[in-house]
Image (cartoon, helix red, strand yellow):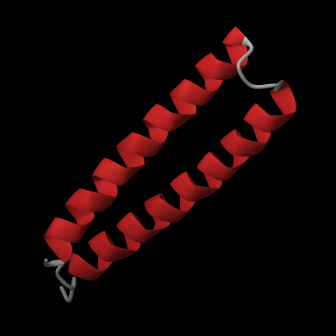
Amino acid sequence: MGVRGFLSHLSIAKGSLTEVETQLLIAKRLGYLDGETADALLRRATQGSCLLAGLIRALKAKQAPANTG
C-alpha cells in the first residue's frame, strides 16, 4: 500500500473515531456511562484524533511537490 492508500485508511479511521465520540456522548446522555468515565474516554478519543490529524497533515505535506519557484 502506498502513501495514498494509507492516507485513505487514516481518513476512514478518523471518521470512525468521530463515530465513537458520538456514541460515547449518547451513552453518557442515556446514563449508560457515568460522566467521569465518559469524559475520560472522550479525552482519549480527542488525543487520538489529534494524533491522526497530525499524521495525515505530515504525510500530505511530504506528498506535496516541492515549491521551488
Q: Is residue 47 left or right of residue 59?
A: right
Q: Is residue 10 above or below residue 58?
A: above
Q: Is residue 48 above or below residue 68?
A: above
Image x and y of residue 36, in percent: 86, 34
Q: Residue at x 56, y 57 (%)?
A: 48
Q: Is residue 46 above or below residue 25?
A: below
Corner quadrant of residue 69: bottom left
Corner quadrant of residue 64: bottom left
Q: Residue at x 50, y 36 (%)?
A: 20
Image x and y of residue 12, in percent: 29, 49
Q: Residue at x 19, y 76 (%)?
A: 3
1 or 58: which is nearer to us? 1
Total numbered labels placed on residues in the image: 0
41 or 58: which is nearer to us? 41
**Which quadrant, please, contains the N terminus?**
bottom left
Q: Is residue 34 left or right of residue 16?
A: right
Q: Residue at x 56, y 34 (%)?
A: 21
Image x and y of residue 41, in percent: 70, 43
